[in-house]
Image (cartoon, grey):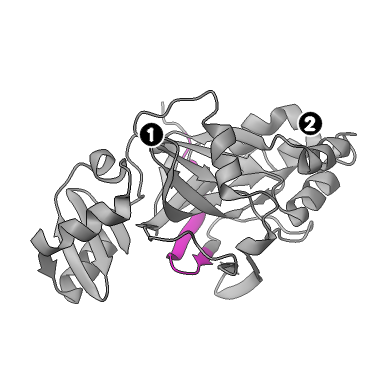
Amino acid sequence: MKIFKISDGAIIQHQGLNYRLRHDWDTLINRENLHGYLSALLPHLTVIDDKIFSNLAGNDLLAPIGTQEVWAAGVTYLRSREARMEESAESGAADLYDKVYEAERPELFFKALPHRVAGHGQHVYIRRDSSWSVPEPELTLFINSKGNIQGYTIGNDMSSRSIEGENALYLPQAKIYERSAALGPCLYVSEQPLPSDTAIKMKIRRAGSDVYSDETTVARLKRSLTELTGYLYRECDFPTGSFLMTGTCLVPPNDFTLQERDEVAISIDHIGSLINYVSYKPKNRS
């Protein structure tokens, strides 16, 4: 089933029906056996028709996040390792990415606080001081406060390849800035883990034409989802849970960089599609 967050609650979509729910988001999702809880709740909820759902989803849809932090895993796919090595070749840091791909300990880094996260249909930003910016489509986990995966969403880990490539120590500046992350369109909750053949697709459109399109599957992920989750929760507490982006395997060619007004569409089987529009952060007004 899917949970869509709106300003005064949520809509649960299950087996062709839409259920209206007024509930605090963090309390709703941060629990054990979220799927079982929602299944037991559905008979007591009001069903709304598709027209009302479309209107709410089109005008009142929010990123499926409350007070949670967003973290990310890096170099979890072979293609990601290759891309990081290519961009950092001149700085002499290429070996770092090769070593972390093979290492027992994964790369994990903080990505965003909730107020920096864009939702479906909203703008993501590219940095003005970056000459090479790309989106990174990622299967994203919702993990409850006990460290157990309860749901999935689509993540866009916006990145400055020129800044990280200049010096690996610039990773926070390459990854963490306003609207550098997007989540959505919903939280997908299932009884079983996502199958390994789950497809991840990304398409980038510019001035009405496709300038990039590719796809992969979750099967290419080097590390298990529970392994990544375990490392994140080893020495960190997350009172309302957390979101973890699990890495990307779709990397545009080295001569590609995002431009203002580009459209980035990311689709993952079972979850849906996350669409965002590229712009710069508005300049501060004095």
Is residue 277 a member of the stretch shown in magenta?
yes
Please state, as top left, top right, bottom left or bottom right, where the C terminus lies in the image: top left
Give the main secondary structure, helix, strand or loop, of the magenta stretch: strand
Q: Residues within 10 Å of mark 2 (few under 14, many from 20)?
A: some
Q: Is residue 155 above or below residue 195?
A: above
Q: Residue 19 has which mark?
A: none
Asked if marks 1 and 2 touch (Cβ < 8 Å), the reply is no
Please state, as top left, top right, bottom left or bottom right, where the N terminus lies in the image: bottom left
Q: Which residues are magenta?
A: 265-283
For the residues labelled 1 and 2, the Cα–Cα distance comes to 34 Å
Nearer-the-camera pick, 250 or 219: 219
Q: Which residue is mark 2?
A: 167
Res 266 seen here: yes
Q: Residue 214's spot in the image, x, y percent? A: 66, 70
Q: Which residue is mark 1?
A: 145
Res 176 seen here: no
Q: Nearer the viewer, mark 1 or mark 2?
A: 1
Identified by mark 1, the residue type is Ser
Q: Residues within 10 Å of mark 1 (few under 14, many from 20)?
A: some
What residue do we see at 24% from left, 56% from top?
38
Q: In what element is the residue under mark 1?
A: loop
Q: In what element is the residue under mark 2?
A: loop
What residue do we see at 40% from left, 34% from top?
146
First reached walking from the N terminus: tag 1 or tag 2: 1
Q: Residue 187's spot in the image, x, y percent? A: 37, 55
